[in-house]
Image (cartoon, rainbow, N blue to C red):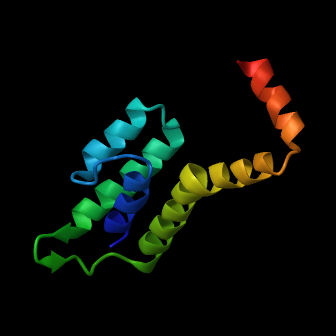
Amino acid sequence: MLRLALQKPCIHLGAKGRNINDDIGALVQKGQDKKIQQSLDIVRVVGNNAVNPGQLDIRDDRATAETLFRLLNLIVDKMISEGRQVEELYASLPENARKAIEDRDS
């Protein structure tokens, strides 16, 4: 289930959502951080090994599930939440300060 949940943030970031491995590859091509890529692949590989068409592997233990939940939360924090927080704080700067920064960087 967590592997399936992983596809949503990938789609949010511009991946196609058809194949999770291809989606991760596309994010890597866009410059995704290596640690996030590794986290994405951990959830993907463990999820692939736990789910086969029409059946679930109930041998997965609680510790594995909790670790994967933590990884998924870390992935979403790094890929989505942190960026939004910075954008909100940046938008709260006075307009003249933002304009001066844009002028400096153009």
User: What residue appears at the point 39 percent right and 52 percent down from the top-left corner?
Assistant: 10
Residue 67 position in % (x across, y down): 49, 67
The residue lying furthest to the left in this view is 54
Indicate the quadrant containing the C terminus: top left, top right, bottom left or bottom right.
top right
User: What residue appears at the point 65 percent right and 54 percent down from the top-left corner?
Assistant: 84
Indicate the quadrant containing the N terminus: top left, top right, bottom left or bottom right.
bottom left
Residue 86 position in % (x across, y down): 73, 48
User: What residue appears at the point 89 percent right and 44 percent down from the top-left corner?
Assistant: 94
73 sits left or right of 3 in the view: right
95 sits left or right of 56 in the view: right
The quadrant in which residue 30 appears is top left
Q: Is residue 83 above or below residue 9?
A: above
The quadrant in which residue 101 appears is top right
The quadrant in which residue 70 appears is bottom right
Residue 78 position in % (x across, y down): 59, 51
47 sits left or right of 73 in the view: left
Number of marks present in the image shown: 0
27 sits left or right of 86 in the view: left
Q: Is residue 17 above or below residue 34?
A: below
Of residue 60 and residue 3, the one placed in the foreground of this image is 3
Of residue 66 and residue 105, the one placed in the foreground of this image is 105
User: What residue appears at the point 26 percent right and 81 percent down from the top-left corner?
Assistant: 58
